[in-house]
Amino acid sequence: MDTKTKLVHAAIAVFKKYGLEQTKVSDIVKEAGLAQGTFYLYFPSKLAIMPSIAQDMIAKMEKQLKLSVNPQAPLREQLNQLVDALFITIGKYRDVLAFLYTGLSQSKDITKWETLYAPIYNWLTAFLVKHRQQLRPQLQAQHTARILLGCIEEAAEQVYLFNQVNPETIALQKQETCLFIAAALGVSMD
């Protein structure tokens, strides 16, 4: 593992343990087993590590999508798998996402969010283009990919970040999200 990755993983562990406000750069480098000056070779401040943490989370999300969505399955099933993949990732990393959103909003790095999400937007755009014949005719794949991700993320965050995690609520939220997306895309409900 390279030094920057060590710092990112250490930062995630320390932020989870102490929270964003209480964490110091010295805590991060101690966790990484590195000298404090090493941190500043990669990041000018504690909050400057947030885009790298976001990249790590987006890579996890993309990996889960690729593992979960079976390209041989019918489109309706693939949509359900897509929703499930994003719910899984957000549920599994909900604590990381909570401090990540806070950290990004406290820095000017929030403007990098759209750029950081490019791999997911590209994956979703390709998914929509591949299934264009089965979707509503006027669909604009690039724009719809952004809306689709926003919709699924918000639905998952409502149950994982803002509520007590309740399996029944999660299942209902996933089901409604799948139905909503299928209807919005013009996918047959059969």
Image (cartoon, grey):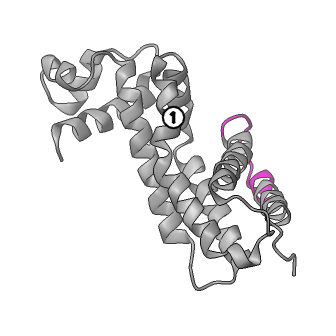
Q: Identify the element where label 1 is drawn.
A: helix
Horizontal relation, residue 23 to residue 156: left or right: left
Quarter the C terminus occupies:
bottom right
Q: Residue at x 47, y 39 (%)?
A: 115
Instruction: Tell whether position 153 is magenta.
Output: no
Q: Is residue 166 magenta-colored?
A: yes
Q: Where is residue 71 in the image (x, y as percent from the top left)?
A: 56, 80
Q: What is the number of callouts on the image?
A: 1
Residue identifier under label 1: 113
Q: Which residue is drawn at 70% across and 48% down?
A: 147
Find residue 42 and report its image quarter.
top left
Magenta part of the chain: 161-171
Tell me what residue is drawn at x 34 percent, y 30 percent.
11
Q: Can you give x and y, in whole percent of width and height, for residue 3 in the image?
A: 17, 37
For residue 124, which quarter of the picture? Answer: bottom right
The residue lying toward the viewer, choosing from 166 and 39, is 39
Q: State the residue at coordinates (65%, 60%).
A: 141
The answer, for residue 20, to whether it is visible in the render is: no
Q: Is residue 41 above or below residue 53?
A: above
Locate residue 70 relative to residue 19 in the image: left or right. right
Q: Where is residue 106 in the image (x, y as percent from the top left)?
A: 51, 16
- Figure check: 75 above or below 150: below
Residue 33 sits above or below residue 152 on the image? above
Q: Measured from the top left, where is residue 167 in percent x and y?
A: 73, 55
Amino acid residing under circle 1: Trp
Circle 1 packing at 10 Å, graded few (<14), some (14-19), many (20+), is few
Q: Can residue 89 be seen in this view?
A: yes
